[in-house]
Each structure stands twice: as C-alpha cells, then as structure tokens.
Image: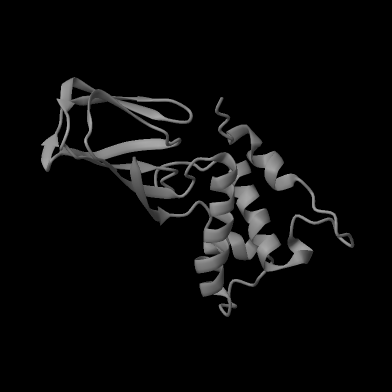
Amino acid sequence: QMITKSKTKYPVSLTEVKSHLRIDASISDDDTYITNQLIKSATRKAENFIDKDIAYTLNNLIEYDWGGSCLEVQEGNFKSITDISLNGTLITSYTTEKYDDKFVVDFDNYIGGIDYTLSMNFFTGYDTSTDTVPEDIKQAILIECGHLYDVDRSSYVANSIKKTDAFERLLLPYKTIRW
C-alpha cells in the first residue's frame, strides 16, 4: 500500500497554544512560528506516539495489481471514505467496518486483479469543526508545544533537567498496540 497524507485541521488552535504559553493574545510576533512549526511538530509527535492520525487528514491510498473482496487499511481514527476507484472507474457498492487501529472495506464481489489499480481517498483524525478532540490529547499537544517553545513551560520539572512523563501518560490510553 502506498498512502499519501494531507493534514487539513489541527487539534489545537493558535489561541489555545498562546494561552497555554501565557503569551498575550495581542502579541503576534511568533504566530507564524507557533502555527507552522510548534502545533504541527507537537501534533506529529503525538500521532507518532499513538500511531494514529490526530489532525484531520485526507489520505490517498493506491494499491497496484489489486484484487479482492475486502481491503484492510492499517489506519486508526478512520472517519469516512470520499471515493474509491478501480482503474479510474468509481466504485460505489461497499461497506466499512471500523476498528481501533484499522478499518476494513468490504466489496459486494471480488473485484480487480493483475493490472488493476485501486485508488481510495479517505479521512482520518479529528475534524475539529464536528468532532471533540479528547482533552487529554489536546493537553499532551499543548505540553509538547510548551516544551518546544520554552523550557520553563515544558514537560520538564522546574529547576531540574528531569523530564516528566506527562505527555506519554496523557496519550497512553490512545496508543495502538499491535501484536
């Protein structure tokens, strides 16, 4: 499987990060840095830890020489499929089953085979306009933003070089464990 990803919405806002970092809302000197670096980097670190998309993400999956009656995709936080096509022909007859760390697309019949290319666009993560991102995930991302921005507001204990495990402890219930 080849999957390309495009992040479209992030789970924390500039306003939330600035509040967490105790930056006055009227000060905009670091807004671009916070939006384009801190939020994206902290979210990516959280996604890598739990092995699922948190940011609302458009995924494009391509399978070459694909044939079958079901397709298993190892992507958690599945939201929806926008389209599936086989050699450019739209497929509309399928059902989906969602699991914690994957989803399965069941087709009515066997389709495809050698020289057939399956393409599917689907969304994963939290759509912040309709979904509520769990507070502990948001807090972990804010902690990481603090760590990346300023050591005094980070996951390190004040006046110490010892890092706390708050980030990991907040995200652990969402972590994918595969056997």
Query: Residue 158's x, y, as percent?
Result: 86, 60
**In this orientation, which residue lies closer to the viewer: 96 or 72?**
72
Q: Left or right of 134: which side holds 151?
A: right
The C terminus - image quarter = top right
Query: Residue 175's x, y, as percent?
Result: 59, 35
Q: Left or right of 165: which side holds 121?
A: left
Give me the residue at 55% from left, 28% from top: 178
Query: Residue 96's x, y, as percent?
Result: 30, 26
Residue 42 can be seen, yes or no: yes
Give me the residue at 37% from left, 37% from top: 79
Query: Residue 65's x, y, as percent?
Result: 21, 36
**In this orientation, which residue lies closer to the viewer: 23 or 170?**
170
Up-down relation of residue 175 to residue 8 (above or below) = above
Extreme residue toward the bottom, this view: 29
Extreme residue toward the top, this view: 109
Up-down relation of residue 27 to residue 141 (above or below) = below
**In this orientation, which residue lies closer to the viewer: 18 or 69?**
69
Give me the residue at 34% from left, 45% from top: 2
Q: Quadrant of residue 37?
A: bottom right
Type of colouring: one colour
Residue 20 can be seen, yes or no: no
Q: Left or right of 61: which side holds 159?
A: right
Q: Quadrant of residue 77?
A: top left
Give me the residue at 80% from left, 56% from top: 156
